[in-house]
Image: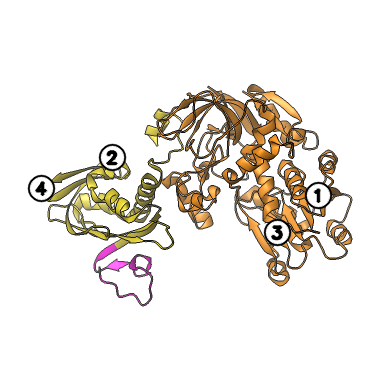
Chain colours: A yellow, B orange
Amino acid sequence: MSDTSVDDAPKRASKDDKDGDLAVVGRSVLVGKPIAEVYEGWRDPTRFPGFMKAVEAVEKRGEDYHWTVRAPLAQTVTLVTKITEDVPHKTIAWESTEDSQIKTRGRVTFETAPADRGTVVTADISYAPPGGDVGRIVAKLFAAEPNIQARHELKRFKMLMETGEIATGSFHSKQNEEN
Amino acid sequence: MRALTWHGNNDVRVDTHPDPEILNPRDAILKVTSTAICGSDLHLYDGVIPGLISGDILGHEFMGEVVEVGPKSTLKKGQRVVVPFTISCGGCFHCKKGQFSACDNSNPAEKQDASEKLYGHGMGAAFGYTHLTGGYAGGQAEYVRVPFSDVGPIVIPDELGDEDVLFLSDILPTGWMAAENAEIEPGDTVAVWGAGPVGLFAVQSAVIMGAAQVIVIDHHEHRLELAKQFGAKTINFEKTHVREALMEMTAGIGPDAVIDAVGMEAHGFVVDNVLDLVKQKIAPGADRGHALRQALLACRKGGRVSVPGVYGGMLDKWPLGAMMEKGLTIKGGQTHVQRYTGDLLRRIMEKEIDTTFLISHRLSLEEAPMGYKNFHDKQNEWTKVVLRP
């Protein structure tokens, strides 16, 4: 992701939030845990469905990860990604392969926050919906609220790391399943 | 179980709901033994705070007996506990700083969107207080699910009755924090708008913290009478020019600190308030802030303004010039209940603080709708309603 900003703000906060022909979403979140623990929490995508509501399943096949992502109207889309960089306690980056229904690339970075505040987790994700029918669903899915979704998933990751659970306002299991 | 349920403006009923269950490892389930109706429940009753859905269970002042615990709860079955109305994880940046009501992790991620838009940040969660703060079922019920039960609830010794400690859940810490935010110094005069439960506890707290003079402003004679037992002086705003009285009672200096314990539904037939009222009828989210405006104008130069009263939205005609030109310090906030419960329980046990004087009516859960109506309509006599499910 090239950064040609004129100021120090991250690209995802820019008014021109494009990464070439790709749209950019992302968010920083403070997780009050040591960097090693936070990195470990993010390292294995097959655990993501445990806290990411938009991700139905992640399966590792060889070096690739196959993501089943929820789309509107009870549809799903499949993403296929490979890890392009993995520096322990620093960064994990990925890129979609040709088998993916969506072209996407992204990076999560980990930095120790000042004064024992924990770890800053920053996600930067670029994506471009492909054409065709699937593309329209995907466009709806991503163009409608990719930023909100990314923000929610990161908040849930933070909850899981800091409290060991994901908050729910429900008071019985049936209500919880509906939410 | 039976629970007091919101159906619409001025429409609450006791309905049957499923019993609560343990959903997360740190949860506990309480059998509620006592629960109170809060003045801020009346804001919900009046529909001036948005974010309730028909069928929501209200109630954020409650205590009870632990009947079930999740694997990570530190409570034990059979313990009697009071539960803070603020739901706090104890582990996020804000909780570790003691800013429990600002907890990052108690409000479900998708429910933080509304407050993030409205206030710039996602808010922490609370019991029985709209989906802006999590949509958690409240405690005006036979049973309640308590998340993060290892952080919030405080265990009560057997020798204390429910009524001695119930108000540790909200209004006592809220009155205490209001006085703390007034940063009282020796010789200070503290003026408190509103002789409701929070105002009365703010008066009591200000006296304990060493205020030389506490003046409380209201129009309900009986409520003003209650304030006098703590040595407070009173002003009835229906009979007296409040600002002039405050100047005359402080040698022309003005109160050193002012506390707005009224909030968004201020009374009084004055121009700004009538305009606010019209706006509030048109759009929930508009605040009615006559008390706060008056407090800002009354406060002495360089004084402190403490705002425990609930505001939820926007206020105009805000005397910003008074804040800047007089150099006022303004502090507000939902109460960081967990920060105060231990100390206040000790003060109750040492009989330094009494909270039972406030209770005017004791009702069964089934009588709760009548309790809401009377607490709302007859504020002079109905000072506090406790329900016994």
Quarter of the image with the C terminus of chain B is top right
Specify the amino acid type for callout 1: Val
- Percent coordinates x, y for residue A56 in the rendering: 26, 41
Marked residue chain, label 3:
B
- Percent coordinates x, y for residue B346 in the rendering: 66, 38
- Marks 4/3 same chain: no
Query: With respect to residue B198, does A124 lie above or below?
Result: below
- Marks 1/4 same chain: no
The quarter of the picture where residue A11 lies is bottom left
For this view, does B303 lie left or right of residue B107?
right
Q: Which residue is mark 4?
A: A62
Marked residue chain, label 1:
B
Nearest to N terminus: mark 4 or mark 2: 4
Specify the amino acid type for callout 3: Val
Q: Which residue is mark 2?
A: A74
Report helix, strand or loop for mark 1: strand
For this view, does B295 lie left or right of residue B116?
right
Residue ID at (81%, 40%): B223
Does the residue at mark 3 contact the one at mark 2 (Cβ under 8 Å)? no
Q: Which residue is mark 3?
A: B305
- Percent coordinates x, y for residue A15 in the rendering: 38, 69
Report helix, strand or loop for mark 4: loop
Gap between marks 2 and 1 measured at Cα: 59 Å
Does the residue at mark 4 contact the one at mark 2 (Cβ under 8 Å)? no
Marked residue chain, label 2:
A
Does the residue at mark 1 contact the one at mark 3 (Cβ under 8 Å)? no
Does the residue at mark 1 contact the one at mark 4 (Cβ under 8 Å)? no
